[in-house]
Image: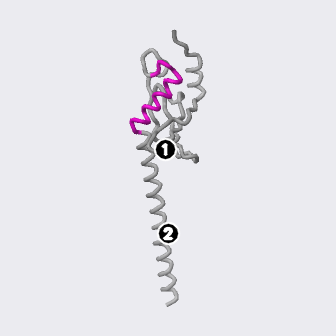
Amino acid sequence: MKTRTFYSILGILLLIIIGIGGKVYMDNKRFNDEMVNVVKSGQAKKEIEIGLKNLDSKALTPKGVIRSYEIDYESIEHNPMGAIMFDVIINKDDNLVAKFDLNNHSNIVEVGGIGLSENLLDLVKGVEYD
């Protein structure tokens, strides 16, 4: 009788632990999906392009040194201060990376900061146009 009660309690505890683990997993997945949706939004892409044009005034044109960009969706993370951090790969070169922070407050998306890889910094540092 004692073993049956022990196994019953153990089974109930196991179900509770699995239930809590499933809830935490689903909450994290939902939160991550929301961050991906913010980064994929048109408003975020517009902010990314503004940030790139601040680095290179002719960015995303044939005359600019920044001709294309691609968002690395695998790099999306939540910043402890509430921002969304992710990498943008420039000109399809993994060595040219801009690390963006997006703030999404009251459904307004703004760039909070941009960090540049050393190679990208060297590329845009000497850019001057007539």
Residue in the foreground of this view, choosing between 31 and 112: 112
Residue placed farthest to the front in the image? 106
Q: Position of residue 49 (x, y in %)?
A: 45, 28
- N-terminal label among 1 and 2: 2
Q: Mark 2 points at which residue?
A: 17
At 53% across and 46% down in the image, what residue appears? Answer: 78
At 55% across and 16% down in the image, what residue appears? Answer: 127
- Is label 1 in a helix, a strand or a loop? strand
Q: Mark 1 points at which residue?
A: 105
Mark nearest the camera among 1 and 2 is 1
Q: Position of residue 113 (x, y in %)?
A: 56, 34
Amino acid type assigned to the residue bearing label 1 in the image? His
In the rendered image, the vertical position of residue 23 relative to residue 82, given as above or below:
below
Residue placed farthest to the left in the image? 42
For the stretch drawn in magenta, what is the main secondary structure? helix
In the rendered image, the vertical position of residue 25 relative to residue 49, given as above or below:
below
